[in-house]
Amino acid sequence: MIIGNRIRRRLAELNSSQGQLARAIGVSPQAISKMVNGDTKDTGKLYQIAKFLKTTPEYLTGEENDADDPVQSVSYPAKKTPATLEKEEARDLGLALIPELELGYSMGGGNVIEMFEHTGVAPFKREWLRPMMKGSFNDLFVAKGEGDSMIPTLLDGDIVLIDTAQKNILQQDRIWALSYGDLGMIKRVRKLPDGGYQINSDNPAVTPMTAYDGEMHVIGRVIWVGRRM
C-alpha cells in the first residue's frame, strides 16, 4: 500500500484527481484506482505517474523518505555521510545496496537490522529485484546459509535473499527466514490444522519441529538463492 498511499498524498498536495492522472498517462481511471487501493502490482507506468506527480519513482515505492520529496520546500541540505554518498552512487548506477546479516543468534531489538549482526552489503540491480519483492528495497536483506539441514535446496555458504515485507504464510512449504527461540534459521514451514506450525528441513535426516503460541517469529520469505559454482 506504500505506492497507493503516496499517490493519494501527492494528488491531494497538487490538488489533482485520480481521473486527471489517468488521462495524463493514458490509462483508465479503474487502473489508477486499483493501484491506489493496492489491488494490483503492475508498476509499468510508475515513471509516468511520478512525472505527473512531480516526484520520483523511488519516493512512490518507499525507497526514499518524505524528506527526499523534491516538491517540498527548499532547505539547506544536511552534510551527507559516506554511507549516504555510497547509496546515491549505487542508485545512479541502477543498483541497490542490500545489507548482509548474520542470521544466527538473535540479539533482540525492534527490527531485523537490530536483531542480527550486520556483516556487509551486497549490490543488486534494482530493476531485477522489483518483480520479486513486495515492499521497498529497505525490506530486503541477504544472509548466508549455514550447515546441511536444507540440502539439497540450500548448501552451506549459499546466499539467500530475504524479503521482510512478506511475513504471512499463505502457501504451504515455502522457504522462510525464522526466529525460533533465540536462533535465526532458514526452513520450510507448514501451517497445521490446530493453529501450530511445522518447521521442516529439506534434509530428511533432520527431525521437524513444531511451534505454537508465538514460539516462532517470521522474519521474511526467501525469494532468491545464489551459490558459487
Image (tube, rainbow, N blue to C red):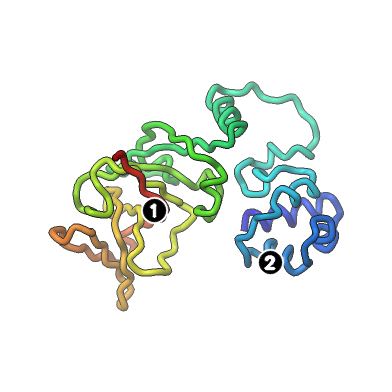
Residue at the (44%, 63%) spot, across then down: 168
Q: Where does the N terminus fall, quadrant-wise? A: bottom right
Say few, some or many: other residues with alpha carbon within 10 Å of mark 2 (under 14 / 14 to 19 / 20 or more): some
Identify residue for label 2: 34
- From the viewer's perspective, tell me whether residue 8 is left or right of residue 202: right
Q: Residue furthest bottom?
A: 193
Residue at the (81%, 57%) spot, across then down: 21
Reply above or below: 197 against 58: below
Rendered image: mark on residue 73: none
Q: Position of residue 112 (x, y in %)?
A: 42, 45
Q: Secondary structure at mark 2?
A: helix
Residue at the (74%, 57%) spot, across then down: 8
Q: Where does the C terminus fall, quadrant-wise? A: top left
Say few, some or many: other residues with alpha carbon within 10 Å of mark 1 (under 14 / 14 to 19 / 20 or more): many
Q: Position of residue 197 (x, y in %)?
A: 30, 67
Identify residue for label 1: 222
Residue at the (65%, 43%) spot, across then down: 58
Reply above or below: 121 against 54: above
